Image: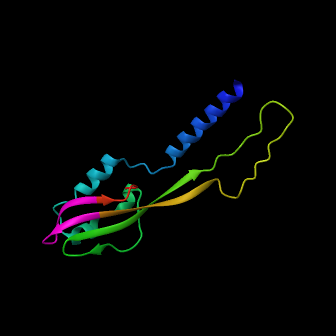
Amino acid sequence: MFVSRSVALALLAFSLSACVTTPSSTRAERDAYLAQFVGQSSQQIRQQLDLSLLGYEQVSSPQISPQALTYTVIRPISIPIPVANAPATGPAHIPAPIGPANSYDVNLHCQIVFRLEQNIAHSVHYSGRTC
């Protein structure tokens, strides 16, 4: 019984630590930040948009066409690696090989697209589940 509670608490702590390591901007904050660029020209957007405020990194220069201004971005996250601990009671030790890293680093991809009409942004859309 004690071991199962300990395991349950360890899993809960691990899942909460995974939440802590993700970027801090919420969907509402992202939507509000990007919505302020609707109505501006593509040149103004390229000069003023700072995607790092949302936890994104630009992969390349924005792509522009008469219909759209597209940013390809990544959101780097770290996923903690669980580590097995030896039981508190008993003489046995559990060998747990641990590498040099304490987490997996992952880049989640996303596209942010400003729809343009006469070089003015009329809407903003996202593609990719990680936006």
- Measured from the top left, where is residue 54 in percent x and y? 37, 55
State the predominant SS element of the stretch in magenta: strand
Residue at x 83%, y 41% (from the top left corner): 93
In front here: 124 or 47? Answer: 124
- 30 relative to 110, above or below: above
How far across and how far down the image is residue 21, in percent?
A: 51, 49
Q: Is residue 6 magenta?
A: no
> Relative to 122, is 96 on the left or the right?
right
Residue plotted at (73% across, 40% down): 85
Coordinates of residue 73 in the picture (x, y in percent): 39, 65
Residue occupying the far right of the picture: 91
x and y percentages locating residue 13 in the rendered image? 58, 37
**Which of the 4 image quadrants contains residue 57?**
bottom left
Q: Nearer the viewer, residue 86 or 129?
A: 129
Quadrant (top left/top right/bottom left/bottom right) for the N terminus: top right
From this view, report whether residue 58 is shown above or below residue 100. Answer: below
Which range of residues does the magenta coloring cover?
A: 113-125
Residue under the image location 62 percent in, 32 percent down: 8
- 114 in magenta: yes
In the picture, which quadrant includes the C terminus?
Answer: bottom left
Q: Say whether residue 35 is left or right of residue 95.
A: left
Q: Residue at x 45, y 51 (%)?
A: 23
Q: How many marks?
A: 0
Q: Is residue 59 left or right of residue 112?
A: right
